[in-house]
Amino acid sequence: MTALFNFQSLLLVFLLLICTSAYAHQLFPGIMDRNKNGVLGVFWKCARIGERLSPYISICCLLMAGSLLIGN
């Protein structure tokens, strides 16, 4: 199954995108701040979500890890 048809995999892809974008923005802020529009703007928006909602995102990551460990 692809991530589009499996809800848990889709959530995992979104969480990984948010966490990776926030980490990349921390390392290279100039590159991400230049590209706020267009296709690369998605990464900037995900970085903002990851930075502003970091406690909730980390809780979601822990819950996802627990569900993957228990479910498989």
Image: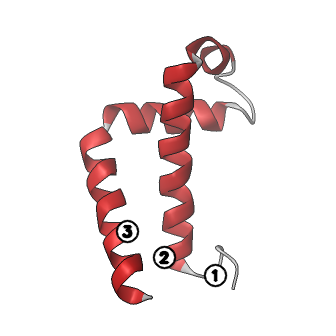
Residue 33 lies left or right of residue 66; in this view the side is: right
Residue 33 lies left or right of residue 52; in this view the side is: right
Residue 17 image point, x, y percent: 56, 48
N-term-proximal mark, 1 vs 3: 1
Residue 12 image point, x, y percent: 50, 65
* Amino acid at dot 1: Phe
Q: Is residue 34 above or below residue 44?
A: above
Whether the residues at callouts 1 and 3 have beta carbons within 8 Å, the answer is: no
Q: Quadrant of residue 1?
A: bottom right
Q: Is residue 31 above or below residue 67?
A: above
Number of the front mark, 1 or 2: 2
Residue 33 image point, x, y percent: 60, 16
Whether the residues at callouts 2 and 3 have beta carbons within 8 Å, the answer is: yes
Local secondary structure at mark 2: helix
Q: Is residue 12 above or below residue 42?
A: below
Number of the front mark, 2 or 3: 3
Residue drawn at point x = 48 percent, y = 76 percent: 8
